């Protein structure tokens, strides 16, 4: 279609992707230009909300990590449950934001730059029991080609286990 291929002479840039811990409907997404993990008006990109299928599109030329924040209006489509108070992230250039991208991003950032994204991804795959060939920054367990495969089930099961630990810790505070 005309919109899928772009208009001749027009150029738009942006960041698109999918947010999943289950597909997340109505989560806030922005590009974190200043790297502080918190949305800053006039610095970071505009905030957008994910669609029912977890997809988002941010029209911007800004670059930085992708930050996702859930609130009382965010629904995990896999369970139908509200998923509030969770922040997830992915490094710039990622096409998905998942538990795996969040852990990868946190490992890189907490290492003070001594750990590469590739090395962090390898650690995350080993910890979560994911196939070594999985590209954490682009793997969408809910994509039509992946849905129901052994890898997608393992990926979502690992995400659910991590979320159970996070929720248990949050309740203990």
Image: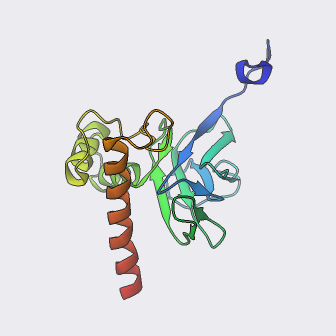
Using residue 28 as the reference point, say whether residue 4 is left or right of it: right
Residue drawn at point x = 62 percent, y = 38 percent: 62
Question: Above or below — where is 69 with respect to 55?
Answer: below
Residue lying furthest front in this view? 148
Residue lying furthest top in this view? 8
Residue lying furthest bottom in this view? 173
Quadrant of the drawing holding the N terminus: top right
Quadrant of the drawing holding the C terminus: bottom left
Q: In the rendering, at what x and y percent does residue 138 appear?
A: 43, 36
| 124 and 91: which is toward the camera | 124
Q: In the rendering, at what x and y percent does residue 116 appear?
A: 28, 40
Residue drawn at point x = 57 percent, y = 59 percent: 77
Q: How is the image coloured?
A: rainbow
Query: How many numbered marks appear?
Result: 0
Q: In the rendering, at what x and y percent does residue 49 appear?
A: 68, 54
Q: Is residue 173 visible?
A: no
Tell me the quarter of the picture where residue 74 sits: bottom right
| 171 and 153: which is toward the camera | 153
Question: Above or below — where is 138 with respect to 21?
Answer: above
Residue drawn at point x = 47 percent, y = 53 percent: 89
Q: Is residue 65 visible?
A: yes
Question: Above or below — where is 123 with respect to 63?
Answer: below
Q: In the rendering, at what x and y percent does residue 90 appear?
A: 45, 47
Question: Above or below — where is 16 with respect to 129?
Answer: above
Using residue 157 as the reference point, say whether residue 128 is left or right of it: left
């Amino acid at each position: 279609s005309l919109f899928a291929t772009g208009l001749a002479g027009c150029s738009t840039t942006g960041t698109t992707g999918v947010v999943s811990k289950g597909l997340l409907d109505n989560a806030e997404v922005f590009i974190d230009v200043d790297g502080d993990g918190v949305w800053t008006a006039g610095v970071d990109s505009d905030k957008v909300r994910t669609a029912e299928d977890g997809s988002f599109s941010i029209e911007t030329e800004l670059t930085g990590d992708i930050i996702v924040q859930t609130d009382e209006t965010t629904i995990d489509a896999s369970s139908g449950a509200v998923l509030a108070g969770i922040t997830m992230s992915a490094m710039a250039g990622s096409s998905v934001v998942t538990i795996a991208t969040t852990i990868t991003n946190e490992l890189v950032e907490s290492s003070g730059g001594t750990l590469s994204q590739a090395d962090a991804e390898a650690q995350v795959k080993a910890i979560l029991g994911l196939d070594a060939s999985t590209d954490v920054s682009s793997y969408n367990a809910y994509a039509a080609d992946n849905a129901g495969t052994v890898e997608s089930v393992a990926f979502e099961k690992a995400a659910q286990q991590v979320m159970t630990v996070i929720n248990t810790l949050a309740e203990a505070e």
